Image (spheres, grey):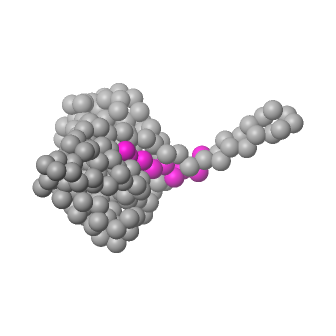
Amino acid sequence: MALITLPSAFKPRTCRFKESVTQRVNASPFAGSEQAIDLLNDRWIVSIETGPLSPADATAIEVFIAAMRGQTNTVALYHFARPIVAGTIAGAKTLSASAAQGAASVSITATGTLLTGDMIGVGGLLLMVAQDCTSSAGVITVPLTNRLRTALSSGAAVTTTQPTANFRLLDTSGVQNTRGWSPPVSFDFGEAIS
């Protein structure tokens, strides 16, 4: 398995991030009760569409699709609509405490704010901020929409500019070659579980 570099021709026109939550729901046919169990294996599903492509860009995208070899290889992706946080976070940006697998928040050594929907990267995970949060005594406690798939160690670096996670190619429309240009290409990616 190799990490494939995203080609410069890959210019998303649309981008949709969707959180996929692994869960089991059981409903009683007699009592009308229901039980939902969160299995704590959240992952991102990303749908992207490029704009129309020049012949050179179409070739680069075609080569990229072939290099992905189905779901064999991975590519590092970030939220193209929100490549940097909207908050004012500053400082070293490291975890101030360890966080257990399944945790719904992390604590970051930094000053400033993070805003609802900001994306941060920690330990190979791409995490979404669940609500606005402000630093107190140099630490920001950050509630997350997605639960941690793996435990994170204190001191781990936190990325706020183009934070990435590795994704596998689930599906693509492929490149349709026409004279002088190619129509948009659509992609579906799933976050690689490591």
Look at the image and tell me in which quarter the C terminus lies: bottom left
Residue lying furthest front in this view?
179
Look at the image and tell me in which quarter the N terminus lies: bottom left
Q: Nearer the viewer, residue 171 or 81?
A: 171
Residue 150 position within the rendered picture, expressed as x and y whole percent measured from the top left: 45, 57
Region in magenta: 38-47
Q: Nearer the viewer, residue 141 or 9?
A: 9
Residue 91, can we see it?
Answer: yes
Residue 112, can we see it?
Answer: no
Q: Looking at the image, is 192 positioned above or below residue 20? A: below
Q: Main secondary structure of the magenta part?
A: strand
Q: Nearer the viewer, residue 19 or 180?
A: 180
Residue 2 position within the rendered picture, expressed as x and y whole percent measured from the top left: 30, 70
**Magenta segment includes 39:** yes
User: In the image, what residue occupies the spot 38% across and 59% down?
Assistant: 168
Residue lying furthest right in this view?
30
User: In the image, what residue occupies the spot 35% across and 29% down?
Assistant: 116
**Magenta segment includes 36:** no
User: In the image, what residue occupies the spot 60% across and 47% down?
Assistant: 23
Residue 77 position within the rendered picture, expressed as x and y whole percent measured from the top left: 29, 51
Residue 30 position within the rendered picture, expressed as x and y whole percent measured from the top left: 87, 36
